[in-house]
Amino acid sequence: MELPTRNLGFDPKLVDYAEALDLQRSLHAQVLDGQAPSTLLLLEHADVYTAGRRTEPQDRPKDGTPVVDVDRGGKITWHGRGQLVGYPILKLRNRALVKDYVCALEQAIISVLAADYGIRGERVEGRSGVWITGGPADKKIAAVGIRVHQSVTTHGFALNCSNDLSPFSNIVPCGISDAGTTTVSAELGRTVTPAEISERMAAELGRTLPRYTSSEESAPSGQHAEERSACSTSQPKEGIPS
């Protein structure tokens, strides 16, 4: 099964957050009703702060910048120019696969970073997303925050490609005060844009995500057991809805 991908817009055609949210909700209803297949949306947003359900007052912008409150898991983050955002609208074949699905998003990012850019991204125990570790402080290079309603997913991931990191200093990103942020470009010392990396991310997600959908025939039991083992976490992740 193929996973259809829609590129909604990249710099200079940045996508308004409210428009993308409306599209997610519309597509969610269509996928739920069987009127549309599970679909991956890829885009680059105009600058915006969004706050998940677990955002604390102290996490919000220090200067009072407006924030869009949304229905995903996790806390506050920033989206904008230079960041690749992916929204898989996926009908899960089993609601119990939510944590495995989140881990699959992380693994797809980790795989593309390693294979195409020589960057070692990792998971951090109890925290969602993809991290660069080994320095004085861990640095987050990709965030993951999702919502699952009636077994259909919305929201997704944000990979820092070539964006300015200063907007993160105005908030407590994802409610984590003891870590930093980074980008693909910062790690490499050259510019890598969302448009450049989007095709590879679409291919990797198209390879891995269909196995979680309701229309995909079950893979051999050993394969799914291996995936769960590779992605298992002993602590809740902040991007996974409770």
Image (cartoon, rainbow, N blue to C red):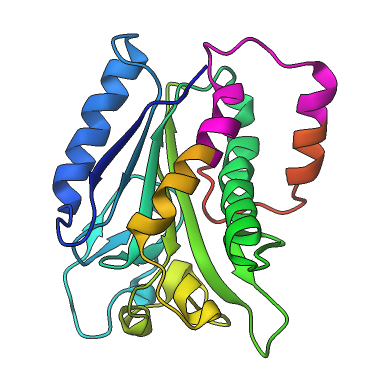
From the viewer's perspective, is residue 22 above or below residue 213?
A: below
From the viewer's perspective, is residue 191 above or below residue 14?
A: below
Residue 160 image-quadrant placement: bottom left
Residue 226 image-quadrant placement: top right
Q: How many marks?
A: 0
* Residue 224 falls inside the magenta stretch: yes
Q: Residue furthest bottom?
A: 136
Q: Could you tell me residue 62's position as x and y percent?
A: 27, 84
Q: Could you tell me residue 33's position as x and y percent?
A: 32, 10
Q: Residue at x 55, y 56 (%)?
A: 238
Q: Could you tell me residue 3's position as x and y percent?
A: 45, 26
Q: Residue at x 40, y 22 (%)?
A: 38
Q: Residue at x 54, y 71 (%)?
A: 140
Residue 154 in view (yes/no): no
* Residue 132 falls inside the magenta stretch: no
Q: Nearer the viewer, residue 64 or 107?
A: 107
Q: Is residue 99 left or right of residue 4?
A: right
Magenta region's main secondary structure? helix
Q: Residue at x 53, y 20 (%)?
A: 213
Residue 176 in view (yes/no): yes
Magenta-tinted stretch = 204-225
In the rendered image, the quadrant that contains the C terminus is: top right
Q: Is residue 80 left or right of residue 160?
A: left
